[in-house]
Image (cartoon, rainbow, N blue to C red):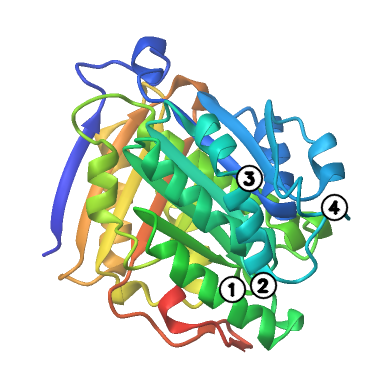
Amino acid sequence: MNNLTFSVLTGGYMSINDSEECDRLVVKVVGVGGVGVLALESMIKAKIRGVDFIAVDTEAQALETSSAPIKIRLGVNTTKDGGSGSRPESDRADAEESRQEIGEALKGADVVIIVARMGGCTGTGAVQVIADAAKVSGALMTVGIVTLPFNHEGKIRMETAEEGVRALGKRVDSLIVIPNEGMAAVGSTEQNLLEVLTGDAILTEAVRGITDLLRPRFPAIDPGDIIRVLPSEYPITFGIGEASGHDRALKAAQKAMHPLSRGGVDIAQASDVLVNIAGSSDMTMADYNEVNKFICSKISDDTQIKICFTVDDRLEDKIKVTVYLSKSEPTATIRTENTNYDVPSYLL
């Protein structure tokens, strides 16, 4: 039998719409580099609530077109052409130059979520400085959410991404790593090309998933719980599913697990699983049981699993299931039905 913790995020039947409880944590999302800044645009359009957005880049043009209320250009005194070429160490130095400005922007944050693509310059180099600044600012929790390069981008870029992930993992409390190649393999062929290449949609859902976990301000779960279940020592993969109508809970759970299983993640080897079930006030115990039964059927008896649920009347007749999976003994590659992707084992 699985080691199961059941948390009810309703606190005497209060819902996610209770603004006093929703606003108790200050959450700041930092988009770093070209992909990170673009992802912020997707998040702003998606109207993720209760979040402050900060765009950070060396490119002046990218920041000028950003809708983020706070924008920080790195390397103003050292970068003359709006970019630093292909050297993450240069962007790390640029971020160090702007450390005070970054620290000021992060001041007062309880939770800092850093979003970037690894393998390039700014995303790989600057995130370490930003993570350090978040700790110094007094944040209770720092989360890294990063994507990896595609195979066609070459071995050097992947090796750069590996180094960046290792360095970032030492500086954040939880690290979610999204292999672009695996996510593209399980996505629809009709999906927007720019969304696939930048990872906008998946990064937006990853951030929304974390903020959904944090938003209900009840003792059942807090940043410390997330850190304990999803430590940065073991990078995290995740899936989100949403469904309505007949068997809505089961369908939502299946959709949440689908990209993990198709993306090559060995679910049975998970050391820890964190599940959030969200639904309106008509969500039933039967819905909970359907999700619990399905997910427990996919993991081993030794897996530590924590299941929470959130009342969110904005979902109306839909159920949304978010699954976070951490592995202490990762697999060597991402596998799909037709292809093995050479992704570092510690990233899975």
Are the residues at dot 3 and dot 1 in contact (C-beta closer than 8 Å)?
A: no
Circle 4 residue: 82
> Which of the numbered marks, if any, corresponds to residue 31?
3
Are the residues at dot 2 and dot 3 in contact (C-beta closer than 8 Å)?
A: no
Please tell me which residue is depicted at 15% across the width and 48% down the height of the picture: 5
The quarter holding residue 288 reads: top left
Please tell me which residue is depicted at 65% across the width and 67% down the height of the picture: 88
The single residue placed furthest to the front in the displayed view is: 77
> Which of the numbered marks, if any, corresponds to residue 161?
1
* Viewer-side residue, 34 vs 230: 34
Amino acid at dot 4: Gly
Q: Is residue 132 above or below residue 139?
A: below
**Dot 4 crowding, Cα within 10 Å, few <14, some 14–19, many 20+:** some
**Dot 1 crowding, Cα within 10 Å, few <14, some 14–19, many 20+:** many
Which is closer to the viewer, label 4 or label 1? 4
Amino acid at dot 3: Gly
> Which of the numbered marks, if any, corresponds to residue 149?
2
Q: Is residue 231 above or below residue 162?
A: above
Q: Secondary structure at mark 1?
A: helix
Which is closer to the viewer, label 4 or label 3? 4
Residue 221 visible at all: yes
Please tell me which residue is depicted at 42% across the width and 30% down the height of the picture: 109
Amino acid at dot 1: Ala
* Viewer-side residue, 67 vs 71: 71
Residues under labels 2 and 4: Cα distance? 22 Å
